[in-house]
Amino acid sequence: MAPTAKRSTVKTRGQKPSQKAPLVHRSPRTLAEKRRIAAVVLEALQAEYPDAHCELDHTNAFELLCATILSAQCTDVRVNMVTPALFARYPDAASLAAATQEAVEAIVRTTGFFRAKAKNLISMAGALMDRHGGEVPRTIDELVQLAGVGRKTANVILGNAFDINDGIVVDTHVQRLSRRLGLTREADAIAIERALMPLFPRDKWALLSHLLIWHGRRTCDARKPRCGACVVRAVCPSAALEG
Ligand code: SF4
């Protein structure tokens, strides 16, 4: 899981140049207020990003599982550069389980931590063959038993490959936006996931992650949020400090 984003700091009126104000400067206090903001955010981001989707290229659950394992500490763009070769050579769990470490390393080298990732991919595929008939399981408990798979990855697979909303994917963008929007003060990913669950309809959990990730990449940048161009500015307690 990526580290918590640093708090940006900006000057506010009346402050000396050396004084800084935290980007998150006030937060809604009640559950009702958070729910009101959550509803506005969901509607506005759905309108802004009607095509929001998982940006890891895949055609089935096995491919998405491999791509998500490779995405740790790596951009989706970079992962999408190596997965065509990986999937062409190892199209299923049986072929990947029989692969050599060296051969997989050679394909995934540019995604970083390539030795560990290659090892996890082969081990994950072996477990699919041994315990799941070569198929990707459909529960969090079974998924997190696989090498290289944590709760975040399990939620990605369930939500995107199987349309199962068991949890909410909390990556660095979801962490940052949840806090800036005042939906939680938590820093830990699992605590943030728990805080978000009662605020959004369950059937929107997978979509919510995509929307927040897309907004984080395009507007609510970690270091320079473009609040002036932000469609949720009206309800964001961190707005107007920039832009
Ligand atoms: S107004 Fe928008 S861009 Fe600015 S901090 Fe809030 S969500 Fe991020």
Image: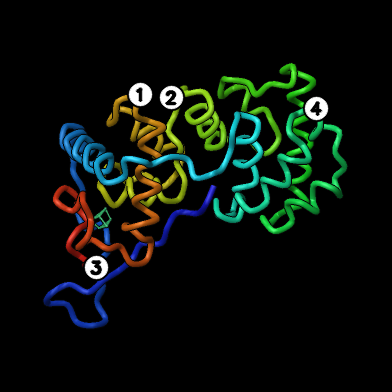
Which tag, 2 or 4, sits closer to the chain's start?
4
Residue at the location (47% across, 46% down)? 171
Residue to which mark 1 is pinned: 203
Residue to which mark 2 is pinned: 165
Report whether 222 appears left or right of 110.
Answer: left
Which tag, 2 or 1, sits closer to the chain's start?
2
- What amino acid type should be assigned to the residue bearing mark 4? Ala
Q: Which quadrant of the figure has residue 201? A: top left
Which tag, 1 or 4, sits closer to the chain's start?
4
Distance from the alpha carbon under mark 2 to that under mark 4? 28 Å
**Mark 2 and mark 1 residues within 8 Å of each other at the beta carbon:** yes
Q: Return the x and y of residue 113 as percentages of the image width and height.
A: 70, 54
Which tag, 3 or 2, sits closer to the chain's start?
3
**Mark 3 and mark 2 residues within 8 Å of each other at the beta carbon:** no
Q: Is disc 1 placed on a helix, strand or loop?
A: helix
Category of crowding for the residue at label 2, using alpha-carbon neighbours closer than 10 angstroms: few (below 14), some (14–19), many (at least 20): some
Q: Residue 21: which disc? A: 3
Q: Is disc 3 placed on a helix, strand or loop?
A: strand
- What amino acid type should be assigned to the residue bearing mark 1? Asp
- What amino acid type should be assigned to the residue bearing mark 2? Asn
Q: Is disc 2 placed on a helix, strand or loop?
A: loop
Distance from the alpha carbon under mark 3 to that under mark 2? 37 Å
Residue to which mark 4 is pinned: 94
Distance from the alpha carbon under mark 2 to that under mark 1? 6 Å
Nearest-to-viewer mark from 3 and 4? 4
Beta carbon at label 3 within 8 Å of ligand 1: no
**Mark 2 and mark 4 residues within 8 Å of each other at the beta carbon:** no
Beta carbon at label 4 within 8 Å of ligand 1: no
- What amino acid type should be assigned to the residue bearing mark 3? Ala
